[in-house]
Image: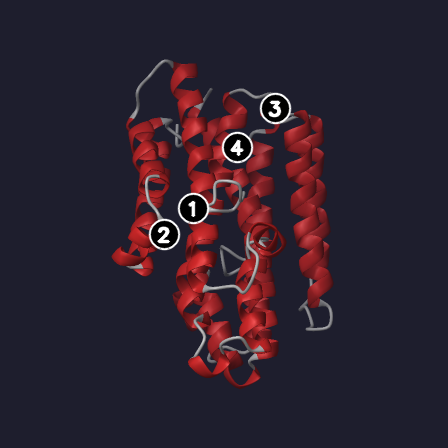
Amino acid sequence: MLGKTAGGLFWMFRYLERAENTARLVEAGFRIALTRSKSAEKEWQSIIRTAGASVAFDATHDSYTGANVIDFLLRDKNNPSSVLSVIEAARNNAKLVRTALTRETWEATNECWMTLSKLLSKRVTEQELPEVLTTIRQQSALVRGATHGTMMRNDIFNFIRLGTFLERADSTARILDVKYYVLLPSVSLVGSSLDNVQWETILRSVSAFRSYNWTHTGKMSPKTIADFLVLDKRMPRSLAFCCIQILDNLNYLREEYDSDLPSFELGDKLNQSVNNRDIDSIFDEGLHEFLRRFLNNSNALSVQIQKDYRFTE
């Protein structure tokens, strides 16, 4: 496969995953801001930090109001990671690799772009926000469904999956890193309805609330939530699950192209750094330190994949 085609597939699905993750992040911020009205501006600021967009936001905005943050993350074309920007980038990459996609996958991607472009053509009010966020998630799910239902399991599919799971792991790590300490309850709030809402929100931001309750009975706690989002191999947005998928796809490409490239070794190390750990050792190291190291290694792997498979050629 041409490197440019591999790169187009990889980034097409990174962007599609990012659109959905951003929608979930905005929803989490909206829920927490509603329950913590006195500190709503700090919450919206933490959302921008999680999205890695503080510099770009501060360059054009003076305050972290809900309206400013929502507009910036959903539809500001000057923000390259806004939903509107990444959906357009995903479609542009889809056009580049059109012949590598099934008709159903292309049509779902094009429909996603048309729907969201229309939906985000004007500012979104707080009353409209829940419906808008639901539509973003649904459109992303339609593309994912078309991809899983019609694409061959070949090298094309593996570049698609690499983009998806690298982006997903990055998102989960960022949310947990920024939100975890923000949401640690004060002694006075432990067990209160506000405490429960805050923990529920961090789980909902990665689509994990119901699955957490399926596997954990009793009250939520910092350690069990971190364990679930980092180490539970059954949870499709956990770091452990994403790392296993990344390594599986890198291994397929290694066998397909009969070559041992540096990216496979980096992927193996990333997987071992998560799946050879337990939550106590991670807490001993420091959750923040663990997550920052994970994000740095994940980014290094992404860069190496692009080099190994010559995305720019």
Q: Which residue is mark 3?
A: 99
Front label number (1 vs 4): 1
Q: CA distance from mark 4 to mark 2?
A: 30 Å
Vertical side of 65 occupied by 267: above or below: above
Q: Are marks 1 and 4 in contact (CB under 8 Å)?
A: no
- SS at circle 3: helix
Q: Which residue is mark 2?
A: 279
Earlier-in-chain disc, 4 versus 3: 3
At 59% from the left edge and 51% from the top edge, which residue is drawn? 20
**Residue 219: x, y in percent?**
54, 65
Callout 4 amino acid = Ile
At 35% from the left edge and 47% from the top edge, which residue is drawn? 278
Q: Are marks 4 and 2 in contact (CB under 8 Å)?
A: no
Earlier-in-chain disc, 1 versus 4: 4
- SS at circle 4: helix
Q: CA distance from mark 1 to mark 2?
A: 8 Å
Earlier-in-chain disc, 1 versus 2: 1
Earlier-in-chain disc, 1 versus 3: 3
Q: Nearer the viewer, residue 278 or 92?
A: 278
Residue 11 visible in the picture: no
**Residue 281: x, y in percent?**
29, 51
Residue 14: assigned label = none
Earlier-in-chain disc, 3 versus 2: 3
Q: Nearer the viewer, residue 241 or 55?
A: 241
Q: CA distance from mark 1 to mark 3?
A: 38 Å
Crowding at dot 4, Cα within 10 Å, few <14 / some 14-19 / many 20+, comes out as many
Q: CA distance from mark 3 to mark 2?
A: 45 Å
**Residue 232: x, y in percent?**
47, 45
